[in-house]
Image (cartoon, rainbow, N blue to C red):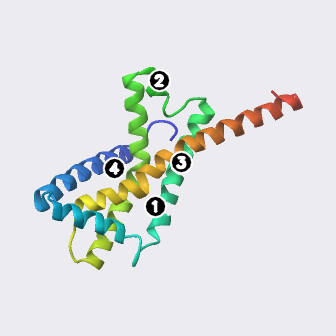
Amino acid sequence: MTGTPSEFSRFLSMAVVLVTVAMLVLGILTYGWSTEVDNRFWHNIADRAHGPMTFRFILQPVMAFIAALPDGLNEARQGRSMFSWTRRGFPALKRGKLQQALQSLARVVLLGITMDVIYQMRVSDRFYPVEALVMALLLAVIPYFIFRPLIEIAGRWWFRRAKAELRHKGEV
């Protein structure tokens, strides 16, 4: 993301955080946590790879890649790394990087949660909020944090190569 995020982008990222917390609390209050719930949870998560709506196992990681692409290229262009805050310990930089990631992921996470709600209603006629969050984490958030550093590395290589070619031609 370049520049200042829009008001809508900030609103959407805050909405995702609030929805996530509300779903987590709702899921725990509604179903609690027991051995039976734990077994059902993992069985249901594993079953999602089969049956209806398996296209989301491709769609959501692709969406995470698309969200990571401009962020990773922007960081590479500026010569920074998303994870540079872990080495330096600057709280403001850390907060900014995490907010940027959240704003990029907000739509993808909402898409993932919506797709899982549709899946759950279609398959089991029940809604398990924590399962929807786990699926969004597995299919969107984790791929984003895998793709973004890879895009930064590829972008740094690409920009260095382009700069070297311009120098070689005498244009810089």
Name the residue that disc number 3 marks: 147
Within 10 Å of disc 4 (Cα), the crowding (few <14, some 14-19, many 20+) is some
Left or right: 44 with respect to 164? left
Can residue 6 be seen in the rendering of this structure? no
Residue at point 53% right, 53% down? 65
Tag 4 secondary structure: helix
Q: Which mark is residue 106?
A: none
Choose the circle earlier in sequence order: 1 or 4.
4
Q: Amino acid at mark 3?
A: Phe
Q: Amino acid at mark 2?
A: Arg
Name the residue that disc number 4 marks: 12
Q: Which mark is residue 87?
A: 2
Within 10 Å of disc 1 (Cα), the crowding (few <14, some 14-19, many 20+) is many
Choose the circle earlier in sequence order: 1 or 3.
1
Residue 42: image quadrant is bottom left
Name the residue that disc number 1 marks: 60
Residue 169: image quadrant is top right
Choose the circle earlier in sequence order: 3 or 2.
2
Q: Amino acid at mark 1?
A: Gln
Q: Position of residue 128 (x, y in %)?
A: 22, 65
| Residue 68 drawn above or below residue 111 | above
Circles 4 and 2, Cβ within 8 Å, touching? The answer is: no
- Nearer the camera: disc 1 or disc 4: 1
- Nearer the camera: disc 4 or disc 2: 2
